Image: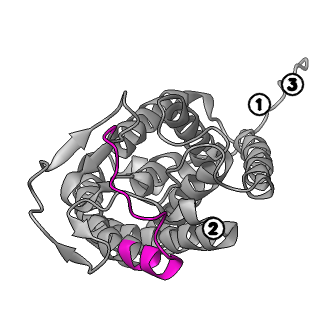
Amino acid sequence: MTHIHIPDGVLPVWLWGGGWMLAILALLVADRASRRYETRRRLPLVGIVSALVIVAMSSEVVPIAYHMNLTVLAGALLGPALAVVSAFVVQVVLAALGHGGVTIVGLNTLLTAAEMCLGWALLQGGIRLFGLPRAGRVAAAATVLTLFVTTTLLVGLVALSGVTQATERETGALDPQNLTFASPFSEGVVHVGLFSGGESHEEPPETGGGLGLKRFATVVYTLGSIGWVLEALVTAAIVSYLARVRPSLLVQPRALAPVRPAPAEHHGGA
């Protein structure tokens, strides 16, 4: 997963407060940008895509403790302006469901919006270069690259916080001490925790605090790289299907054209 998954009171105020301010600024910019286009017809799509992302982020691939994102797909369908709005809606709902704290909604909005916008840009560029018939392959590559970039941003935020508890995370079947997998399917394969925050409520074993930053980054990239491939396959399959049956959703993720005032009617006598 590439969103911060910790409760309130862990990150310093200046960090999560700055995240909120930047998120509000991004929403204002997105609102201003969306007014240039006919977006009212796309509002139902925003709701549908946001709900899809919420369910995905609440579902865990248990052996690797990876939460799906589907953010590249969301960005491809919504475009950058509406993607920012969707990212905020998603994070507010997830926080309300206990999927992370309220104070980190701002930072999570920025990370999620960055995924959607970067994924949209890479997919649009790839389709222009390689054509719509290869949209699935382009989507797979865009997903892996996007998640790598935003995972790096996540690790950077954790390093910036300087808080040991921020490195605590579930590691699935991966032993964080020696980076080996043991009984990867003993706890199941997929867990959907939509109304439980996607979290285990069992007492975690005593580990003496969070992981060190280097070990945390190693764990995140090790588990994440597997998750990126899985998500790339899912995204590629959906994008390939859309490219065949509804290509306009991909090549025109924003509104078709800026809204222009209707020409004034001229009334004149013959």
* Residue at x 9%, y 63% (from the top left corner): 183
Figure label count = 3
For this rendering, which residue is in front, 184 or 204? 204
Tag shown at residue 157? 2
Q: Where is residue 202 in the image (x, y as percent from the top left)?
A: 30, 40
The amino acid type found where label 1 is placed reads: Ala
* Residue at x 53%, y 29% (from the top left corner): 96
For this rendering, which residue is in front, 92 or 215? 215
The amino acid type found where label 2 is placed reads: Leu
Q: Position of residue 238 (x, y in %)?
A: 26, 52
Q: Position of residue 185 (x, y in %)?
A: 9, 56
For this rendering, which residue is in front, 102 or 71? 102
CA distance for labels 3 and 2: 59 Å
* Residue at x 52%, y 31% (from the top left corner): 93
Side of 28 relative to 40 (left or right): right
Q: Where is residue 140 in the image (x, y as percent from the top left)?
A: 31, 69
Q: Do the residues labelled 1 and 2 touch (CB within 8 Å)?
A: no
Q: Is the magenta stretch mostly helix, strand or loop?
A: loop
Q: Which mark sits nearer the N-terminus, 3 or 2?
A: 2
Q: Circle 3: is it few (<14), some (14-19), or many (20+) Cα within 10 Å?
A: few
Query: SS at mark 1?
Result: loop
Query: SS at mark 2?
Result: helix
Residues rendered magenta in the picture: 201-219
Q: Are marks 1 and 3 in contact (CB under 8 Å)?
A: no
